[in-house]
Image (tube, rainbow, N blue to C red):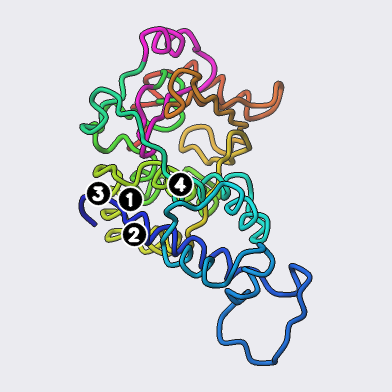
């Protein structure tokens, strides 16, 4: 996969897969006929629900989103029962905005503000890091290295969550619910691809992972998108054992393509004690992890 992703193909496949997951009875339509040639709703059924002509919807599902109005997209999103993240993705694909290129963006440079780096260094009991486009890991603190491994030992190109999750077997062991982590990772990359289909580094990453990981290839084909800013992860650390940690993701106001991510444990819990031990071991803990 070279150069860039095909926005028309992305739009076409996204609409088709969203339509395929709905049944007539899900949206209050009678399911006529025992044999249905296509999974889910027919195009004419979706067009009826959205209040547009079949020809108009067909052109859109064929990837021709030129001049489609926000009102029509809203109607189609309601008919398809899209989530907020899915509706945003549909809008990015059908009505792309002219992206303001930041300096160095084409070369993949995403500088982290000095104040953020200082903030990371000042947090010594909570794993924290800054992530950017394409799931790249841009900066981290000592506790993040103790929990996830010393990313500083990796070449810059390999400091990438998607690569680590799908290509590094140690991360399969670290995340107890690896399947969910993998799904979340692909869903994030899909959102990123909708915003930046002309990003050659993102296209190259997707191509590499598609070749090297059957799981990635299968998940990428679902066209699922999701934004998850908080939640709980269960991990199995080689030094301190099982941990249950809550994570919070804070998008930067002045650069929404960077996020500040923290992990913390419930006070007084075994996981809190495990984090305390990791903090006390510091660089020794990081050195013990293969990453």
For discs 4 and 3, the disc positioned in front in the rendered view: 4
For discs 4 and 1, the disc positioned in front in the rendered view: 4
Which image quarter holds the C terminus? top left
Residue under circle 3? 204
Q: Identify the element where label 1 is drawn.
A: helix
Confirm or deny contact between disc 2 and disc 1 (CB under 8 A).
yes
Horizontal and vertical percent for residue 187? Answer: 49, 49
Residue under circle 4? 95
Q: Earlier in the sequence, mark 4 or mark 3?
A: 4
Q: Which residues are magenta?
A: 113-139
Which image quarter holds the N terminus? bottom left
Q: Nearer the viewer, residue 122 or 257?
A: 257
Q: Tell me the distance, in whole angstroms, between the alpha carbons under discs 4 and 3.
A: 24 Å
Q: Earlier in the sequence, mark 2 or mark 3?
A: 3
Residue under circle 2? 213
Horizontal and vertical percent for residue 35? Answer: 64, 92
Q: Tell me the distance, in whole angstroms, between the alpha carbons under discs 4 and 1.
A: 34 Å
For discs 2 and 3, the disc positioned in front in the rendered view: 3
- The residue carrying pointer 3 sits among few (fewer than 14), some (14 to 19) or many (20 or more) residues within 10 Å by Cα, namely some
Instruction: Report the residue at 28% width, 49% height from top.
Output: 203
Q: Tell me the distance, in whole angstroms, between the alpha carbons under discs 2 and 3.
A: 14 Å
Task: Look at the image and tell me whether residue 155 can be seen.
Answer: no
Instruction: Report the residue at 61% width, 58% height from top.
Output: 76
Residue 204 lies left or right of residue 184; in this view the side is left
Does 117 sit above or below residue 143? above
Does 199 sit above or below residue 60? above
Q: Identify the element where label 2 is drawn.
A: loop
Q: Nearer the viewer, residue 86 or 75?
A: 75
Horizontal and vertical percent for residue 24? Answer: 71, 75
Q: Identify the element where label 3 is drawn.
A: helix
Residue under circle 1? 167
Q: Nearer the viewer, residue 143 or 50?
A: 50
């Amino acid at each position: 996969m070279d150069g860039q992703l095909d926005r028309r193909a992305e739009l076409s496949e996204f609409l088709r897969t969203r339509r395929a997951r709905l049944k007539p009875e899900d949206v209050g339509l009678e399911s006529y006929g025992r044999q249905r040639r296509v999974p889910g709703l027919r195009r004419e059924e979706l067009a009826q629900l959205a209040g547009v002509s079949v020809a108009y919807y067909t052109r859109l599902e064929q990837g021709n989103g030129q001049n489609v109005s926000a009102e029509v997209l809203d109607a189609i999103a309601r008919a398809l029962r899209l989530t907020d993240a899915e509706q945003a993705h549909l809008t990015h694909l059908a009505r792309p905005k002219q992206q303001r290129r930041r300096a160095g963006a084409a070369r993949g440079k995403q500088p982290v503000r000095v104040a953020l780096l200082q903030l990371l260094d000042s947090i010594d009991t909570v794993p924290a890091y800054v992530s950017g486009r394409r799931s790249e890991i841009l900066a981290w603190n000592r506790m993040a290295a103790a929990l996830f491994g010393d990313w500083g030992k990796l070449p810059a190109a390999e400091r990438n969550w998607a690569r680590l999750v799908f290509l590094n077997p140690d991360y399969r062991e670290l995340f107890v619910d690896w399947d969910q982590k993998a799904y979340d990772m692909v869903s994030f990359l899909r959102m990123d691809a909708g915003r930046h289909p002309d990003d050659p580094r993102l296209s190259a990453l997707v191509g590499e992972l598609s070749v090297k990981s059957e799981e990635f290839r299968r998940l990428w084909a679902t066209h699922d998108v999701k934004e998850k800013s908080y939640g709980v992860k269960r991990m199995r650390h080689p030094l301190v054992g099982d941990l249950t940690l809550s994570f919070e993701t804070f998008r930067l106001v002045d650069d929404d393509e960077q996020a500040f991510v923290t992990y913390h444990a419930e006070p007084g819990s075994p996981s809190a004690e495990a984090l305390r031990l990791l903090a006390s071991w510091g660089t020794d803990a990081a050195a013990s992890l293969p990453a």
